Image (tube, rainbow, N blue to C red):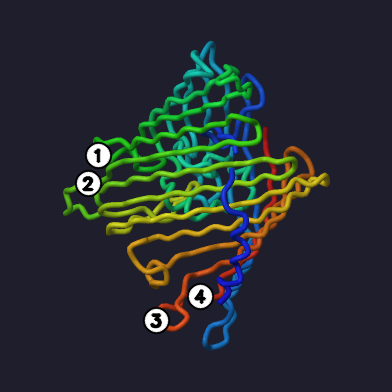
Amino acid sequence: MKKYTLIIAIFILFIPMSDFAQGCMTPTKDGVSIIGFVQPEWNYNFFGKNDEGKNLNTNSFYFRRARLGVTGKIPYDFSYYVLVELSPTQGGPQLCDAFITYDRFGPYLKASIGQYKAPFSRESLQPCNGLYTINRAKVVEELGTPLRDIGLMFFGGTGTKQIFGLSNENIITYSLAFMNGAGMNKLDDNPNKDIIGRLVLNPWKFVSVGANYRYGKQENPDSAITKKDERSRWGVDAEFKYFNFILQAEYIYGTDKGSKLTGGGCGTEPTAVAGNFKSDGYYVMAIYNTPWKIQPVVKYETYDPDKDTRDDAPASYKQSTLTFGLNYYPNDWARVQINYLYKIEASSSTDINYYNEYPNDMIVIQLQAKIE
């Protein structure tokens, strides 16, 4: 089985990135700015043939994302950020981000209110237009759901203040958010709020380590059940930079009581599944910056949606993916990404009822142009 050929990928294990703002893009100048980006894409799915010999492969052009927005400052201590998603494949047109920030006491303490990315997971907080691979890891999209929410967040860092004799900027950064927990563009359906916290240590420029936690209660999808569902998550992550090498890793563990959200990802609607679940997963990724504006990437990820069942149980088998990528940056505003995804489904070698492996590898090519 092809999963056994991937053991060599484990050598990339562990390692570490700097945190990102709660929006998709960071303004590069003061005053009012038009921001946005478009990501047209082509993918080819290798689904093989059915029993009748019909070719099941798919071949499609589409828009991954098409976002346009505005950001600016209001005298003297306020700023605003609004970003709209226009791509129909991401549920558009719809409001993606919209928040106001008060930064009178920055960099030590700032506050934002509105809709934005929840401060959970390193890769989730990495901007869509700055991802090293076209897709986020499945564990991030599943256990980070909802990636966007509405609420109030306090955040900041140590700025240029020296701690323990270290001179790096923002040695410590933090975020603490109180959010609806219902997802983007939705009113809360109960009086409870999700509590989300993230802490990042960046003692030197070449290394950063982060930890995050989330807890919340939601209404069960079955209106006949009055007891609220519970959702808790915790995760750790790190990034290490050495000359032209970047190494990243992240682990997330989650428990769901009553129901859990699956799917969703960046800008799309998650689906509720009834039951109690313990889930976890991780990814490890290596990136190399060449002198020719070309960036090779290798990423291994795995996700177990239900740790209380065997890894090859057909309804909730463990899933892994090995991504081989190549990024090309012709300038500061454009990027070309090529990814080949080698997918592995946990399967039994003796029981056909527990055989999940099937043709589903894919190749994806994305072109990006930024507006700023």
Question: What is the quadrant of the N terminus in the image?
Answer: bottom right
Residue at the spot 50% in from the left edge and 23% down from the top edge: 156
Q: Earlier in the sequence, mark 1 or mark 2?
A: 1
Residue at the spot 37% in from the left edge and 50% down from the top edge: 254
Identify residue type, mark 2: Lys
Q: Callout 4: few (<14), some (14-19), or many (20+) C-alpha neighbours within 10 Å?
A: some
Read off the residue under disc 4. 357
Read off the residue under disc 2. 228
Cβ–Cβ below 8 Å for labels 1 and 3? no
Q: Quadrant of residue 309?
A: bottom left
Q: Earlier in the sequence, mark 1 or mark 4?
A: 1
Q: Earlier in the sequence, mark 1 or mark 3?
A: 1
Read off the residue under disc 1. 190
**Residue nearest the viewer, comparing 298 with 91:** 298
Give the CA separation, mark 1 to mark 4.
Answer: 41 Å
Identify residue type, mark 1: Asn
Identify residue type, mark 4: Glu
